[in-house]
Image (cartoon, rainbow, N blue to C red):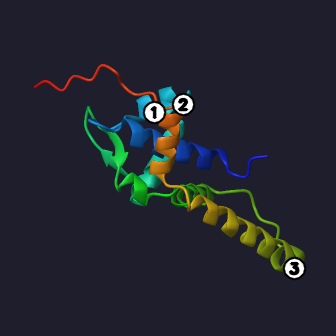
Amino acid sequence: MNFLSRRSLLAIAAVTDIALHARPMPVSAKALAARHNLPPRYLEPVLQALVRQGVLKGVRGPRGGYELARERRRITAGDIVRIAMAAQDEDGATPLPESRLAEVVVAPLVKRGTEAFLAELDQVTVDDLCQKAQAEGAAETATNLDFTI
């Protein structure tokens, strides 16, 4: 069973992918989408939310795309999930139950569980994820980089 929304999983994967591939040029949404087998338009709301919250930086222009706005060791999986969850709430989630039972019994339980889950994600940085990706061979990198001017 997976407790994270697809949007949250995508956000963590996207930020990690950008951390791995944004040198020497920003990662385009098109390239990011291709690596994750997704339509580019599906990524844009998540990427824009991450830009608004200072995790990513958007670079305009024909060679534009996304790069990290902070050092990868200063971004946690918890940070990314909170942003993705907030963006999802803004998009209009399904209505919550409105009852005394939901308010005084269920909501506090879910809140404690969510806080514990996010606290665990706060222990994992994007740098940790990048190192794991490289160790597992999941970090596809460009092999024919040419730095001649």
- Crowd band around label 2 with a 10 angstrom C-alpha radius: few (<14), some (14–19), many (20+): few
Residue 149: numbered disc:
none
Q: Amino acid at mark 3?
A: Arg
Is residue 49 at least partly visible in the picture? yes
Say whether marks 2 and 1 touch (CB < 8 Å).
yes
Image point (60%, 50%), residue name: 8
Image point (40%, 28%), residue name: 141
What is the C-alpha distance between the residues marked 1 and 3? Answer: 45 Å
Q: What is the total number of numbered labels drawn onto the structure image?
A: 3
Report which residue position mark 3 lands on.
100
Which quadrant holds the C terminus? top left
Q: Secondary structure at mark 2?
A: loop
Q: Is residue 52 above or below residue 131?
A: below
Q: Is residue 14 above or below residue 103?
A: above
| Residue 13 in picture, x, y percent from top left | 53, 42
- Crowd band around label 1 with a 10 angstrom C-alpha radius: few (<14), some (14–19), many (20+): many
What is the C-alpha distance between the residues marked 3 and 2? Answer: 42 Å
- Mark 1 or mark 3, earlier in chain: 1
In the displayed structure, does residue 135 sit left or right of residue 4?
A: left
Image point (30%, 19%), residue name: 144
Report which residue position mark 2 lands on.
36
